[in-house]
Image (spheres, helix red, strand yellow):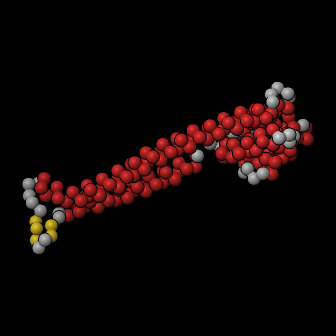
Amino acid sequence: MPKEDQELVYALWAMEVLVSSGVGLESAIQHVAEGGYGSVSREFKKVLKESYGGLEKSLDMLTHETKSESLKKTFVTISRSLKGETELADSLRTLANRETEKRKARIQRYIEKLTMVSDIFLIVAILVPIIIAIIPLVGPLASGGMPQIEEEKITISSEIIMIVRVILLITVLGMGMIMFWTKNLEANV
């Protein structure tokens, strides 16, 4: 997802409020260009910079240059309102609502994935220590013998200790992978 899509929601709401309150379109575009909306502000600065042939031509040109589908829709909507095809404030409100809904859906998917990850993490964090505690006792019992008890100590074969170490290593690596995967999920919200 292009970074513009993350910042566009706020820029659209700001433009809608400005246009609805009677501020002109060019002033609203200038507000977004100077408003600190990250890459969206840079794109709107391009609109103003390229507007020597007219704002409409600038918007049409940048519509073809941008990679963000949402930003393309925004430029097309503003261009159509300049041609008199649509009411700008209503169109901006509709676009802002759509972008807000898309963002909510992305956040919901992120929450669902994060819930799944936390469930896996809890299962691993609870079950693996239990398994590690039981394996040394089950190993000698499964082979038909009893663990040797000497002065309140249980002797454990080196094979079982190696298995426990491998399981611990796999658990630590698995938890690290889960944390890395969860961190990478954040970028898409």
Residue depicted at x 81% and y 43%: 18
Camera sees residue 70: no
Q: Is residue 13 above or below residue 82?
A: below
Residue 176 picture location, percent across and down? 43, 56
State the image coordinates of residue 41 (x, y, percent, origin top left).
76, 48
Quadrant assignment, res 23: top right
- When asked about the image quadrant of residue 138, the answer is bottom left
Which quadrant of the structure image shows residue 172?
A: bottom left
Q: Can you give x and y, in whole percent of width and height, for residue 72 in the image? A: 73, 36
Image-based side of 125 in relation to 117, left or right = left
Q: Residue at x 13, y 53 (%)?
A: 142
Q: Would you say residue 135 is visible in this rendering?
A: yes
Q: Residue furthest front?
A: 21
Q: x, y (%) of residue 81?
A: 82, 31
Q: Quadrant of the N terminus?
A: top right
In the rendered view, does 5 fall on the left or right side of 159? Answer: right
Residue drawn at (91%, 37%), measured in percent from left and top? 53
Q: Nearer the viewer, residue 90 or 121?
A: 90
At x 77%, y 39%, the residue is: 16
- Nearest the viewer among 101 and 144 is 101
Is 116 positioned to the left or the right of 98 in the image? left
Along the line of sight, the residue nearer the viewer: 43 or 81: 81
Q: Residue furthest top?
A: 85
Residue furthest out toward the bottom:
151
**Number of disc labels:** 0
